[in-house]
Amino acid sequence: MSSNMCETVANQAEVPDEKGDSDKGLYDNFKTTKKPRPPKPRDAVTIAVSSRTLFNMAQENRIYEQEGLEKYVSYQQEHEEEPLTPGAAFPFVKALMTVNARLRDLYPESDEMFDIVLVTNNHAQVGVRLINSINYYDLTIERFCMTGGKSPIGYLTAYMTDLYLSKDSKKVQEAIEAGIAAATMFTLERENDLSDSQLRVAFDGDAVLFSDESEIIMKTQGLDSFFEHEKQFANKPLAQGPLKCFLEALGKLQRKFYSKDERMDCPIRTYLVTARSAASAGARVLKTMRSWGLEVDEALFLAGAPKGPLLQKIRPHIFFDDQMFHIEGAQKLGTIAAHVPYGIGQKYHRGIALQPSPPGH
């Protein structure tokens, strides 16, 4: 469907209820008068989001789980004039659009910007409600992938995906195994106020930006062995982790602002938030990023202290971590967090090894 046709559908939608109006009002300052053209995929940083991360579809998902596919599709069609409410990835997507607006001002002819793709296993008939909702919030999302119940993971490579966000942990695991940066998102009970002029992205280090090789030492041999290992291999770069390429993509866009002498006013800011100690285990991390030609704007070494309070000050649009207890701690303080199911940390919770389920369970 062309963008003009999508706009026609959106214009025919009835005025939503008060809750919908309230949600829209939160994001009015992002509105544009004309939808820009999508960038060419080969030049863009492609962010694939599922429908349940972009929008809050908890009620619709309950209908699907309790009453089945046919009732779910019927419900979506009956309510397709009612825009869905924002989901966990919505602020992140809006921030991507803010960066794109700045890039278009500086580089009107360039396609080096974010391209947001909706990737979902929804039935195509649900697409009308998704299109109406996207137009209601003035989102620039022109590329859709609706697979009618089949896993969309096989299409991510064809869409040249740089990051995939979903609420389905199994699909996220599939994507990571296919070599695509991916993370599982969760619905927040409450959310911090976020910047509407700067995209803020926070990363854990081990098993996120870097491989889990050092974390394996810590989990299996203890903290003292970990410190000794990092000291011994301080000059050997760590292998890359599942989200290294996404940080690289962010850095590429940041440099476009730097080349226009806008480093201090760059609308992208990146953070390393790691449980590592700086003096004992920080040098290898910084040297690794230097060897990659990458940098972060802020590097925060917490030496095992909780990450939640610091993230509450940073207020990132998204925080990536491989361990659920860090995710949970961040969420309790209103941070949008995404779980990266990678590495040895998946076998532990709060430092305690998880016991495998007995056969047949």
Image (cartoon, rainbow, N blue to C red):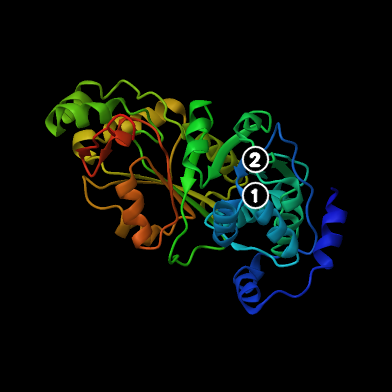
Q: Secondary structure at mark 2?
A: loop
Q: Secondary structure at mark 1?
A: helix
- Tell which residue pokes out farthest to the bottom in this image: 18
Q: Is residue 303 above or below residue 238?
A: below
* Sequence-first tag of 2 and 1: 1
Which residue in the structure is indicated by mark 2? 149
Residue 60: where, in percent of width, then height? 60, 59
> Looking at numbered disc 2 in the image, what kind of residue is underneath it?
Gly
Quarter placement of the C terminus: top left
Q: 279 or 194: which is nearer to us?
A: 194
Q: Is residue 321 above or below residue 42?
A: below
- Pointer 1 local density, CA inside 10 Å: few below 14, some 14–19, many at least 20: some
Residue 250: where, in percent of width, then height? 54, 41
Rendered image: mark on residue 69: 1
Q: Is residue 354 above or below residue 72?
A: above
Q: Is residue 83 left or right of residue 171?
A: right
Q: Residue at x 61, y 42 (%)?
A: 47
Q: Residue at x 70, y 54 (%)?
A: 73
- Pointer 2 local density, CA inside 10 Å: few below 14, some 14–19, many at least 20: few
Rendered image: mark on residue 199: none
- Quarter residue 17 falls in: bottom right
Q: Residue at x 47, y 44 (%)?
A: 184
Q: 107 or 338: which is nearer to us?
A: 338
Q: 320 or 106: which is nearer to us?
A: 320
Residue 190: where, in percent of width, then height? 43, 67
Q: Is residue 73 left or right of residue 318?
A: right
Gap in Å between the C-alphas at discs 2 and 1?
9 Å
Answer yes or no: do the residues labelled 2 and 1 have beta carbons within 8 Å? yes
Residue 24: where, in percent of width, then height? 64, 70
Q: 323 or 265: which is nearer to us?
A: 323
Q: Residue at x 29, y 22 (%)?
A: 235
> Looking at numbered disc 1 in the image, what kind of residue is underneath it?
Leu
